Amino acid sequence: MNEADKLQLLSALVDGECERDQAAQVTAAWRDDVELRTRWHAYQLIGDALRSDDLAGGAGDAVFLRSLR
């Protein structure tokens, strides 16, 4: 499985769109691939932010920018 295929399957897994055999393939691939596990973590954080009003935009941006300054 090439890198593009791994990333596509990983994204489908995160979105709940993988078939069982595809999920088995991508989880086997990430066992030995640090970059793929890092990408999985990033996808999960992105999903958390998209599903959370507190994490995605709104007043949180202003608070973040004030603390950054």
Image: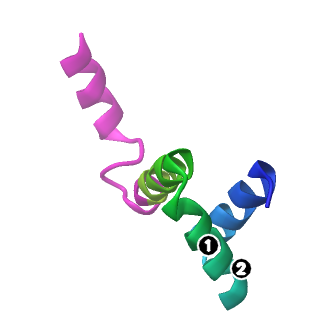
Query: Is 19 within the magenta?
Result: no
Rendering coords of residue 21 (x, y %): 70, 87
Amino acid at dot 1: Leu
Q: Residues within 10 Å of mark 2 (few under 14, many from 20)?
A: some
Q: Is residue 27 left or right of residue 7?
A: left
- Mark number for residue 13? 1
Pick out the residue farthest to the front: 32
* Colouring chosen for the image of the structure: rainbow
> Is 47 placed above or below 35 here?
below
Observer able to see residue 52: yes
Determine the residue positioned at 19% across, 20% down.
67
44 lies above or below 13: above
As drawn, the residue found furthest toward the left would be 67
Secondary structure of the residue carrying tag 2 is: helix
Q: Main secondary structure of the magenta part?
A: helix
What's the residue type where badge 2 is placed?
Gln
Residue located beneath label 2 in the image: 22
